Amino acid sequence: MMGHSHAVSGALLFAATAPFVPPLMGIHLSPAEVLMGTVLCAGAALLPDLDHHDGTIANFLGPVSKLLCRFVAWASGGHRHATHSLLFVALMGGGSWAGITFLGRYFTIGLTFFLLAMAIKALRLHPPGHGHAPWIIVVGLAALGTFGMLTWLPNAPGWLPYAVALGTLAHLLGDCLTKQGSPLLWPHKERYEVVLIKRTGNDMETKILVPVMSVATFGLLLWSTAISPSVLG
């Protein structure tokens, strides 16, 4: 799947589950937190592709992200290996929880900036172009967005590790719809797939799945934010 598709799927899953799963974890979300979580989950849905130096997010922070992607690709065994597994989902969720719990506010702000930058890049919320300008604009927009979120962002938001894990899982589920599949039980090498998308960027993905997911996400957001005061306290 394309990066844009992954981001939309992450947003969809968070908007759909916000009224139910976080309360089961003892986490109560305000409407602002539902909105923030939806956007940041969209960014987290790009995390598995940190193993792809030519992927959508390879240039979201310019040379810094290029170098990071090359390192992750080397450490994980290449594209669609370790980072496309349930173990990686657990590591991302657990690592986010540990950072937020033990490192506090600065880690939360840094993680928010990182995820927001990926979401802006993947959702194409920046002017198109090549060279240095696009990623500089992404950095600037992510910095402004993070600053804007600080009013509603707790020092240790319990929903943020959930958003990270859910977004990562959304990516894996999306790739399971393609011919290449995902090695969900890595280091076991078998790949799991139910092929709906025979070629990345085909009509099934761009003209059917993405528009349907986008409309559903907006509808679920309206519903989730509307009921959050009564359901989530």
Image (tube, rainbow, N blue to C red):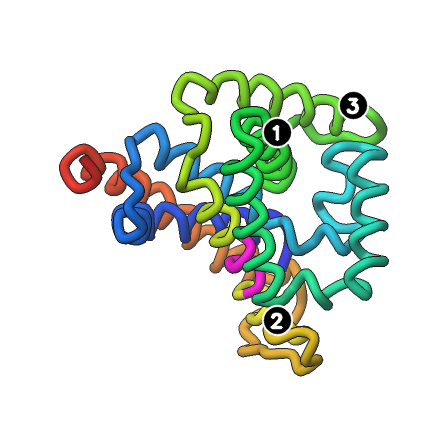
Is any atom of residue 181 visible in this view? no
Compared across the picture, whether 223 is left or right of 50 comes to left
Q: Residue at x 62, y 67 (%)?
A: 85
Cα distance, mark 1 to mark 2?
32 Å
Identify the secondary structure beneath mark 1. helix
| Residue that extends furthest to the left in the rendered view of this protein | 230
Compared across the picture, whether 131 is left or right of 112 comes to right
Q: Tell which of 87 and 59 is nearer to you.
A: 87
Q: Position of residue 125 (x, y in %)?
A: 59, 31
Mark 1 vs mark 2: give the one in front. Answer: 1
Q: Which residue in the structure is indicated by mark 2? A: 178
Compared across the picture, whether 9 is left or right of 141 comes to left
Compared across the picture, whether 202 is left or right of 18 comes to right
Q: Residue at x 28, y 46 (%)?
A: 26
Q: Residue at x 46, y 51 (%)?
A: 211
For residue 213, the mark is none
Q: From what the image shows, is residue 44 above or below residue 197?
A: above
Q: Residue at x 65, y 79 (%)?
A: 191
Q: Position of residue 74 (x, y in %)?
A: 85, 58
Q: Which residues are magenta?
A: 168-172
Is any atom of residue 88 visible in this view? yes
Q: Are marks 1 and 2 in contact (CB under 8 Å)?
A: no
Q: Which residue in the structure is indicated by mark 1? A: 110
Q: Position of residue 193 (x, y in %)?
A: 58, 77
For residue 133, the mark is 3
